[in-house]
Amino acid sequence: MYFELAKRMSGLEVSKLRQELRKNMERKDTIPFGFGNPAMESYPVETLKEISDVIYENEPEKFLKYGQTSGFQNLRISLLDRLNNNYSLKHDNHEVVISSGSSQAMDLIVKILCNEGDIVICESQTFNGCVNAIRSYNAIPEGIPMDESGESIDLEILEERLKKDTQKKIKMIYTIPTFHNPLGTSMPIKKREKLVELANKYKIFIFEDDPYGDLIYSGEMLPKLKSFDKEGWVIFVGSFSKNLAPAARIAYVYAHKDITEPFIAAKGDADTHTNMYWQCMADEFIRNFRFDDHIQYLKELYGKKCQLMIKKLNKYCRPHLSFIDPKGGFFITCKMDSTINHRIFMEKLLNKKVIVVPGNLMSVNGTGFEDNFRLSFASPTEEEICQGIKLIGEALEESKY
Amino acid sequence: MYFELAKRMSGLEVSKLRQELRKNMERKDTIPFGFGNPAMESYPVETLKEISDVIYENEPEKFLKYGQTSGFQNLRISLLDRLNNNYSLKHDNHEVVISSGSSQAMDLIVKILCNEGDIVICESQTFNGCVNAIRSYNAIPEGIPMDESGESIDLEILEERLKKDTQKKIKMIYTIPTFHNPLGTSMPIKKREKLVELANKYKIFIFEDDPYGDLIYSGEMLPKLKSFDKEGWVIFVGSFSKNLAPAARIAYVYAHKDITEPFIAAKGDADTHTNMYWQCMADEFIRNFRFDDHIQYLKELYGKKCQLMIKKLNKYCRPHLSFIDPKGGFFITCKMDSTINHRIFMEKLLNKKVIVVPGNLMSVNGTGFEDNFRLSFASPTEEEICQGIKLIGEALEESKY
């Protein structure tokens, strides 16, 4: 019973910490490196208004009356085309279904695949929303550490673990292979191939969470895990939360019909269908309003902020912080060296009104990684980045052992 | 595991029947007495466009960036006020939280309250979406018949059942007390009081599903079950699906904080929050665009259709059909007398392209009530009502034993 579960959860220290963090994030006078919100200037308000006028003009009943649980047919086709054109994804017996954000996709996939006590493997540092969804069904999220490169879940440890799963409790691997949250890193191509091989070999699903996939600022676009999938073990989930608007609550699942069919049944029970206004908006944007130009704009906007943050981190925070330069996405995770007292550092930071996400809150168990913190370069302004990173540098100096 | 459950469910005869019905409903050349869709002419498109222009003009970030899981604060306040002003609902330690349609409210309340094997009591004829939500968590929907009046779940049978529940497996009673789906009837005031008494006595929650509550066409407005609730056992759920637009996917839960707090936690996992565009639209509509005038328009629109359908049923279908005149909502359930072969009747009706919902599909177990069928008077035009009821009369004549 979730009721009891939620009470247990709310009693946990980690949950209190999260609530506190959220409160701080919502304060107005802070430097917002915490939230994974898109930048205010990222929203193409004028274009959206134009598109909205078009869909109100054309056939407003489309977004007012009940829609289909699987999603707006036109959008499903637009997305299939886009996945094929932009990412060379094309599989037999696959389809796109629309979900109310990636969080619903995760929630329902866990509901579909897991009994109570089943296990979902996660990267030990990961997006806590998905960890909570796993727990909400009394399934168990189990962290596997990143390997030495810091760019991939450790595939050797993973295989050892899968070998030991004689009772077949492990049902899925949840991963963010591209512009990882919180790490900002991307899994190298060889390891992608290997991970999908393991899924095939051990007959375990992979949930490829790809909200940031479009937002690449430098380097080569890496193939999706899904592109190595021959047998339908990879469930690819894309989203409009980071490249359009999070409050639209639209994401999409691209997977084999063996998955999408029970998904649609579960979604029917869960919310009948996703709001149609934003499904029509997204479809119209893709078809007639040069959506990929908007993506290009976002890449320039965020690429510039990313470079600025890296430059300022190098200037003010070396050598006490180490981090891997992200090539896309929203985040940089910084690791403090052993000269820094991370408790003191976090206190100093809060006094300076700089909000970051402590590493333990972006981990499977809510503990560990206390010498890590996540920075988002997406929502702060350039001025806030300059000022905030300088303050982080000062906090580091003030927190030495 | 829902995966297996869904496979089992899709193997069921009743699920096949539902799919077939849906296919028929979606055909264009039919008379649509099946769907619970609002009428096309019910959508206040021009007003909505005006409101949309206002919210794009005012502060579009509000409906683009991440919102709060509990819902748009302004709308929550508007709804609290509206519940108090229109229905005299006011309780200590209660709040309104927004859900993605009533279906999500039901889904999450079951998730919160039920372990696998727990029981939710339903009226034996009821909305199958909610029955499916119960099953989707491996909880058990259990039907209690309506009493002789046909207006209320049989409270004596219910109390007998509650007395026998020594293991406390029964967690909730799901009911649509006002303008019932599929029956169209409303529970009398004394029985409302008694039902809430039983909930108090046996410490069982009541899910008061009230999507049609505003849409009253004749007689006195009955007090909500919630208005008799002193101890917080009634979870009141209202919706914008029938009085604004179903594809907006907004409904709301008004309940004690002991329920809303885990609800918000579960909702965070399920879809982060409900789309903000329609939350802003609904709030603006209520505050500044005379929402209650729109409700008045709907009452006149549907009241007229309801009267017309009753008139035509009396003209063409008596004495072979009996039914209780609804005083609001969308539906009339008709019962065939014993001179009619209901199998033949359903075949004839399909040949005449009149789509109705067979009684067994609006029941807890998917069986029984084969001599019943549900008519919606909301979405068909007046012409379709006249033509369709005449065809039903003909089908009755052609289906006598």
Image (spheres, coloured by chain):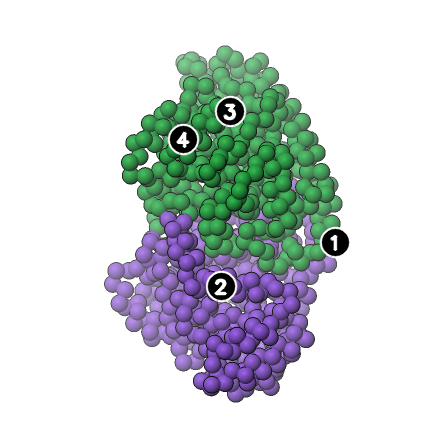
Chain colours: A green, B purple
The residue at the far bottom in this view is B319
Q: Amino acid at mark 4?
A: Leu
Mark 3–mark 2 distance (CA, rounded to whole Å)? 45 Å
Residue at mark 1: chain: A
Nearer the observer: mark 3 or 1; the answer is 3
Q: Nearer the viewer, residue A335 or B92?
A: A335
Residue at 33 percent of width and 45 percent of height: A116
Q: Which numbered tag is attached to residue A189? A: 3
Q: Position of residue A369 (x, y in %)?
A: 41, 25
Q: Which residue is mark 1?
A: A57
Residue at 38 percent of width and 39 percent of height: A171
Q: Secondary structure at mark 2?
A: helix
- From the viewer's perspective, is residue A18 above or below residue B155? above
Decide which of tag 3 and tag 1 comes sooner along the chain: 1
Q: Which numbered tag is attached to residue A198? A: 4
Mark 2–mark 4 distance (CA, rounded to whole Å)? 39 Å
Residue at mark 2: chain: B
Q: Which residue is mark 2?
A: B18
